[in-house]
């Protein structure tokens, strides 16, 4: 019984120390603010997702065409808009990465909310 | 030792409460160190629950009957493996298993995603909320560490639980049930934090797949256990507790499909949140069903007061999910729409509707007896109800598994469809025609299941053959999209399951013979079974008999020895089925026997038995399908370094330095 309670106490102390560790490591931090994604960064993430989707859609179309699921006519009809979409997504992302992060032109909005 | 167990659980409860309260405050007020501290509390609770679990296992192993739980579920002559499996054989132990798995999953998932601070800050309190409930139950309502004056021996274990499958089946189910907490916690964390991008999906993709795989394997193991051990010749009885595992699995299946639409097209964000919440809440509902005593089932625990607590928790989590999704609807709405009703994404939507419809009709079947009892007329829905909806929704689902891979993303023209459908359609027509000619129209559902299965197999084979040619090799093909090709392998497993289920249910043969004496024979489906003799058997904790039958037919000759084991007046008896697996037909010859007794309850001296024989064609495809299912799931889950680098780069902007 006694050793059990002693073990429990030791375990509890260790746990409390572990829980308190962020405060022990940084007793007086310069900032205690939890990082929140700035709207500009959120937009950048959304654009990166849109870019990946557009590139993935192109890859899928190419592969479906090669495997015979998409006819030549359908391929020609779809590949142009998909390429444009991918190019727009890449351009928007590059502009976001190079330019100021405080505002985003409406034309760079991703194709979803 | 029990005191240490109680202390460990109390410590865990305190840590979870801290993770919930401090974590919520930190996420709300944006306090970085406090959020890290709450995260650490969640992680530190895992060793605490491990200690509690280790203590219960040691008590079981030492037959320490001062633990009421150990005395209630084991006895001295119980083999060690089954003694340790009593950990999840009772109410309190299984709750502890829920908690230890939940804590382990939560600690690992949070640790792996610790750089996504904004998302994790809200995910930690959601995990804390679930864990607070279960640790509260273990500390204050249903403790496995309740002590008593030790009796000379324990009550023992129910015979049907003394089966090797029971060593793996319940833990697998729990790994699945509890695993659904991970996508739920991240999804709710995403809603709370407003991070409704795909980060939470990326973080939980493999967790969901693993939970879904465990749940599927757990159900298959349970089905095999029921088949070999319960002795009624079936493997799924639409029992409420069996349904309780099937419903979240169906919802998770729907989610695994629809989440691909969100990733590829940015659509179905609301629907995916609904599915994640549905899967988790159905797993809590399953926990409620097994423990509340509201339904009668061979699988449920005895009636106990904890049912009301779990019902309260379920109502809370349903309300919590609905309110959060409703609150964040503006962030979840998307502009993208389906371009065509004939496209890959459209087939995914149809698949989702069928899966959810099937899950909800099963839910209604489970709830109906409870609801009708509440208005004073107890009525239950039995096999015909479930079979009707299984055929109505299940057969189109099989067909969709074949159609989906053949249809292009976005939109498909009639001309392309005609080209890609030609071979699978031809294979299906020929298969259906041949089966019709062979007289398989005795069951239209069975005939359709076989025909649709042929269509799916042809479609999958075609997909691999064409894909291999386009990609330049099978390895390159699979590695370019492991999820897709792993998914196709899982589809092949589902086809094996469908063929096995159709064969063993729609085309099975059953014969019963009462008072069969040695020397007499029985005919069934081309086999002749001759009853030779009866023999006594004795095991560590039972006595019983085996009736020996020689069977000939279909060019085969074999022996089966069905019988009964008797475990004493408290535990009772169990039917011991004898099964011959025919390697050529992949079917089974299944036999059960009970001896005809005298007025005193002893077997009659003339050896008369009541014999039941079943011939179940193709049933072994179900179990083979289980292995294919696991293989496919592993292929889909296998890490893809290129994909991981791409995703890491995508979310690098939102990541913070690691820290504890």
Image: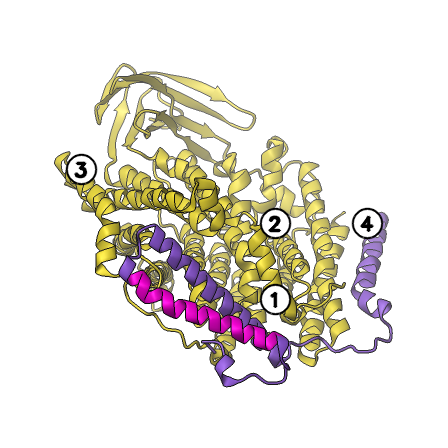
Colour given to chain A in the rendered image: purple
Q: Neighbour class for label 3 at 10 Å: few (<14), some, many (≥20)? A: some
In the rendered image, residue B469 lying in the magenta stretch gets the answer no
- Label 3 and label 4: CA atoms lie apart by 69 Å
Q: Which residue is mark 1?
A: B651
Residue B181 at least partly seen: no
**N-term-proximal mark, 1 vs 2:** 2
Please give the range of residues in magenta: A74-97
| Labels 3 and 4 within one chain | no
Q: Main secondary structure of the magenta part?
A: helix
Do marks 1 and 4 both belong to one polypeptide chain?
no
Badge 4 sits on which subunit? A
Frontmost residue, B236 versus B162: B236
In the picture of the structure, the residue carrying the numbered disc 3 is B435
Q: Find residue B282 and name its label.
A: none
- Label 3 and label 2: CA atoms lie apart by 50 Å
The Cα–Cα distance between marks 1 and 4, rounded to whole angstroms, is: 46 Å
């Amino acid at each position: 019984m006694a050793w059990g309670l002693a073990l429990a106490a030791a375990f509890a102390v260790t746990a409390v120390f572990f829980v308190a560790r962020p405060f022990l490591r940084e007793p007086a931090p310069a900032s205690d603010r939890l990082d929140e994604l700035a709207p500009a960064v959120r937009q950048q993430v959304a654009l990166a997702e849109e870019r990946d989707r557009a590139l993935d859609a192109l890859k899928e179309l190419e592969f479906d065409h090669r495997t015979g699921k998409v006819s030549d006519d359908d391929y020609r009809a779809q590949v142009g808009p998909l390429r444009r979409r991918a190019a727009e997504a890449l351009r928007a992302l590059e502009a976001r990465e190079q330019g100021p992060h405080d505002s985003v032109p409406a034309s760079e909005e991703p194709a979803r909310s | 030792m029990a005191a240490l167990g109680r202390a460990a659980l109390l410590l865990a409860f305190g840590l979870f409460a801290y993770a919930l309260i401090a974590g919520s405050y930190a996420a709300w007020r944006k306090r970085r160190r406090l959020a890290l501290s709450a995260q650490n509390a969640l992680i530190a609770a895992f060793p605490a629950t491990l200690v509690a679990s280790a203590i219960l296992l040691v008590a079981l192993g030492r037959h320490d009957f001062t633990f009421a739980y150990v005395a209630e579920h084991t006895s001295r002559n119980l083999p060690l493996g089954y003694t340790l499996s009593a950990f999840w054989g009772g109410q309190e132990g299984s709750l502890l298993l829920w908690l230890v798995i939940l804590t382990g999953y939560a600690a690992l998932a949070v640790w792996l995603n610790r750089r996504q601070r904004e998302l994790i800050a809200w995910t930690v309190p959601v995990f804390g909320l679930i864990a607070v409930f279960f640790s509260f139950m273990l500390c204050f309502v249903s403790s496995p560490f309740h002590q008593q004056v030790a009796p000379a021996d324990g009550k023992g274990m129910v015979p049907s639980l003394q089966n090797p499958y029971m060593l793996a089946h319940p833990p697998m189910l729990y790994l699945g049930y509890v695993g659904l907490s991970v996508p739920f916690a991240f999804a709710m964390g995403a809603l709370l934090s407003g991070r409704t991008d795909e980060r939470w999906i990326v973080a939980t993709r493999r967790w969901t797949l693993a939970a879904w795989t465990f749940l599927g394997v757990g159900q298959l193991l349970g089905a095999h256990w029921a088949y070999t051990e319960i002795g009624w010749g079936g493997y799924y009885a639409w029992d409420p507790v069996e349904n309780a595992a099937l419903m979240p699995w169906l919802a998770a299946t729907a989610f695994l499909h629809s989440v691909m639409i969100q990733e590829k097209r940015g659509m179905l964000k609301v629907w995916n949140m609904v599915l994640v919440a549905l899967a988790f809440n159905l797993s809590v509902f399953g926990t409620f069903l097994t423990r509340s005593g509201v339904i009668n089932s061979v699988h449920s625990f005895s009636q106990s007061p904890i049912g009301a607590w779990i019902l309260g928790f379920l109502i809370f989590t349903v309300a919590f999910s609905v309110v959060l999704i409703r609150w964040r609807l503006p962030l979840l709405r998307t502009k993208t729409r389906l371009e065509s009703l004939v496209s890959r994404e459209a087939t995914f939507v149809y698949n989702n509707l069928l899966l959810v419809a099937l899950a909800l009709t099963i839910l209604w079947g489970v709830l109906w007896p409870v609801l009708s009892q509440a208005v004073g007329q107890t009525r239950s829905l039995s096999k015909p109800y479930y079979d009707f909806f299984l055929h109505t929704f299940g057969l189109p689902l099989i067909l969709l598994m074949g159609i989906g891979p053949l249809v292009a993303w976005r939109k498909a023209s009639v001309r392309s469809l005609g080209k890609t459908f030609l071979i699978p359609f031809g294979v299906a027509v020929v298969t259906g025609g041949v089966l019709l000619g062979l007289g398989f129209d005795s069951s239209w559902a069975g005939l359709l299941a076989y025909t649709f299965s042929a269509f799916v197999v042809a479609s999958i084979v075609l997909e691999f053959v064409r894909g291999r040619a386009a990609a330049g090799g099978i390895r390159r093909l699979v590695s370019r999209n492991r999820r897709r090709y792993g998914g196709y392998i899982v589809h092949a497993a589902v086809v094996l399951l469908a063929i096995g289920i159709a064969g063993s249910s729609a085309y099975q043969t059953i014969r019963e013979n009462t008072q069969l004496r040695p020397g007499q024979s029985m005919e069934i489906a081309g086999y002749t079974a001759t009853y030779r003799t009866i023999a006594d058997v004795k095991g560590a904790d039972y006595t019983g008999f085996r009736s020996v039958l020689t069977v000939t037919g279909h060019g085969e000759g074999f022996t089966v020895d069905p019988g009964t084991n008797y475990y004493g007046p408290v535990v009772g008896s169990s039917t011991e089925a004898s099964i011959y697996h025919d390697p050529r037909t992949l079917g089974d010859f299944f036999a059960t026997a009970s001896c005809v007794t005298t007025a005193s309850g002893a077997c009659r001296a003339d050896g008369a038995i009541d014999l039941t024989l079943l011939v179940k064609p193709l049933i072994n495809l179900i179990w083979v399908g289980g292995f294919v299912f696991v293989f496919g799931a592993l292929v889909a889950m296998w890490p893809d370094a290129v994909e991981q680098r791409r995703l890491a780069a995508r979310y690098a902007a939102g990541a913070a330095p690691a820290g504890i």
